[in-house]
Amino acid sequence: MTIEQFGLDPEIQEILKNQGIIDFYPPQAEALPYALRGEHLVLSIPTAAGKSLVAYLAIVQRLKHEGGKAFYIVPLRALAREKYEDLKAFETLGLKIGLSTGDLDESDVRLSKYDIIVCTSEKADSLLRHGLHWLDKIKVLVIDEIHLIHDPKRGPTLEVIIAQIKALNPHTQLIALSATIKNAVELADWLGGKLIQSDWRPVILKEGVFFHNTIKYNDSSTKKIEGDTKKALELLVQESLKDGGQTLVFVNNRKSTVSLANRLSSVVTELLTETEKKQLKKLVSSMKQEQAETASIEQSLVTCIENGVAFHHAGLESNQRRLVEQGFKDHQIKCIVATPTLAAGVNIPARRVIIRDLWRYDENFGMAPIPILEYKQQAGRAGRPRYDTVGDAITIAKDSNQRDQIFYNYILADTEPIYSKLGSQSALRMHLLAAISTQFVHNPEEMYTFIQSTFYAYQTDEFTIKKEVDTAVEFLLKNQLIDEMQTSYISTLFGSRTSSLYIDPLSAIQLKTALERSNDKEVTPISFLHAICSTPDLRSLYLRGSDSWVEEKADCIKHSLLLDVPNTSSDEYEWFLSDLKTAFLLEDWIEEKPYDALVLKYNIWPGDVHTIVDMAEWLLHATREFARMYNFSCVSDVNDLLIRVQNGCKEELLNLVTLKGIGRVRARALYHEGFKTVNDLRTVPVERLAKIKGIGTAVAKNLKQQIGEVGLRGNKQLRGSHR
């Protein structure tokens, strides 16, 4: 159906036409009348079938005619950036688009000037905790990837946001977007919305299994591919690329992404033109320029990209993942070998998707089959709109039995139903504390009413709900996060600060304990580093068989630790060593150990270092805030440690890193040249500073400008984007 048939504002129609959109896909055409009338809507359709556009149009049509604001909530920062860029196209309507994924310990007052705010679910939840004075202005709430309600980490937050906004502003239109899920009817019923469910795709998807040089597809067709059957993957990639397509290969672990990308490099590079090879060299050059400290392990990525292949997983740094994604979108990179995280992230379609691994290691069950929903998400990446008429998703079987099993268990199977994860004690205590501290609920009756409005309650019996809620409340009372006042609950100062800091109440209790004990201990940086690494908010590194050095080192520093050390024969002792190993990584980081050394010693990737450092920053910020309440004498030491973790530097560089644009590398270069404090730079000519390695004229001039404004330690504020 053409865009003129839906009563869209003429200016909106013009924007769509400028983007080449003159008609709508069938699911979009079915959903738009409900969306534009302001009705609640659950849109459950495949990847690339145009879910987001329905939400965009519902937002801009309503806001243009009624005013107000809209929230567009996504699970990942990379997705937030993608949606933000999409919505920027509608700014010509006079709408201001904002993006917020950063600091969770602030109300972000600047957002009040925006009409459409794109943010992660954690940021939205944090904003609600800080009391949005413009909450009644939210006309549309979009929850993207709502099937992630089944995710133990993100799901509870999504539920709570929806339940709170429904209660606080009943007139807000709810639009939930999802991949195809089995129990979408339940979600729609819970939200009180219209369900639009469809299997329609703009590019036909054929799912098949490769065995004995033949792909057997779900439409009963077959395709013969000649070559060595022992090199099935190479044959499938080669055949797709020869026809001008691109390929995504999904594997179950990081190590496989690297080894397989290296293996496929020799296949892909033979099919590249000289022009394409030059473009890839430029892409590699831009990646190197963005990299402040390149670990040698990244050389394997550089080599692969020069051959038209890349690997992609969470261990890469965010800028590397972004460049790989963009290189693929620009058709420069021909093949990406990735872990499943790519399938749940930004929109990167390929003509062919190869799902090599249908089993994955689970720490509780060993090797286990992947969920059907995960398989469907990976398969759904096949087919590039505007480039392909057909996309194919292929798995590889070792024998005819396995081929039949794949068809039965995955290709022809329904996805699993999704279930709420709000019922866990960690989720309940965190969100109940937030509800009490923001005075969203005041007494037990209101608390039960609040929980009864969630998807958790929709799927759970009343007895179980009451039992779990009572257990969580008992925990909050026992640990003095809330107080009981006759028939009502109020949060203590400790509880309110815990909630606004957006950390697990159990983390707050451990940090408070560490601070109270610090007066009786000989405190060193490792004391607080171990304390933050012991919290449930920071995921510790795995302890490997070769990590006996951790236990040896533990014996030397146990006396300075602020939390209890378990008995060596207990089950908790291995967790203790795992936490301590992570603390040692942070200790090496602030001792200015290079990435190469960290990657090698801890058997991790640079992206893992950044993830741990970011979370450590946040928890040290929380520790500093609690120190103001429980042990003020620690504030200065914790603040210094925080700045060291931020910058990865020794204590002697603390003064220099207060300058903008001066990280640990440039600060160390200045220090080596005899400039040990900001004051040492005051009478030095720009030309002298510019000659120092890593400084240059532009940075030198910037330093001289700053010296007149910033000369005191501590002026550098805690950076945002911690979580």
Image (cartoon, rainbow, N blue to C red):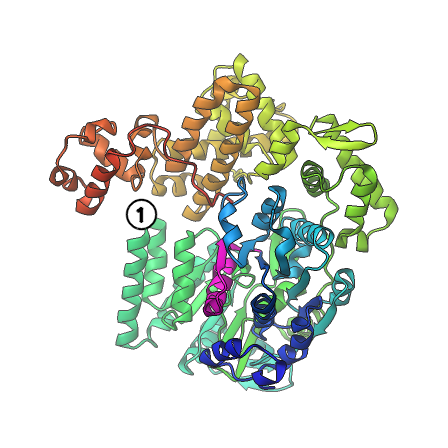
Given residues 707 and 697, the one toward you in this image is 707
Which span is picked out in magenta? 75-100
Residue 695 position (above or below residue 354)? above
What type of secondary structure mainly makes up the magenta span? helix
Q: Residue at x 34, y 28 (%)?
A: 713
Q: Quadrant of residue 107?
A: top right
Pointer 1: what residue? 292
The answer to if 231 sits in the magenta stretch is no
Q: Residue at x 60, y 81 (%)?
A: 25
The number of numbered discs placed on residues in the rendered structure image is 1
Q: Is residue 258 visible?
A: yes
Q: Position of residue 689 (x, y in %)?
A: 16, 38
Q: Is residue 588 visible?
A: no
The answer to if 98 sits in the magenta stretch is yes
Q: Position of residue 220 (x, y in %)?
A: 65, 85
Q: Residue furthest front?
A: 66
Whether residue 166 sits left or right of residue 662 in the image: it is right
Residue 156 position (above or below residue 578)? below
Residue 255 position (above or below residue 544)? below
Q: Residue furthest top?
A: 520
Q: Position of residue 316 (x, y in %)?
A: 43, 52
Q: Residues within 10 Å of mark 1 (few under 14, many from 20)?
A: few
Q: Quadrant of residue 396?
A: bottom right
Q: Position of residue 606 (x, y in %)?
A: 41, 46
Given residues 253 and 624, the one toward you in this image is 624
Q: Secondary structure at mark 1?
A: loop
Whether residue 241 sits left or right of residue 95 in the image: it is left
Q: Residue at x 26, y 37 (%)?
A: 706
The amino acid sitting under disc 1 is Ala
Given residues 212 and 667, the one toward you in this image is 667
Given residues 130 and 84, the one toward you in this image is 130
- In which quadrant of the rendered image does the N terminus lie? bottom right
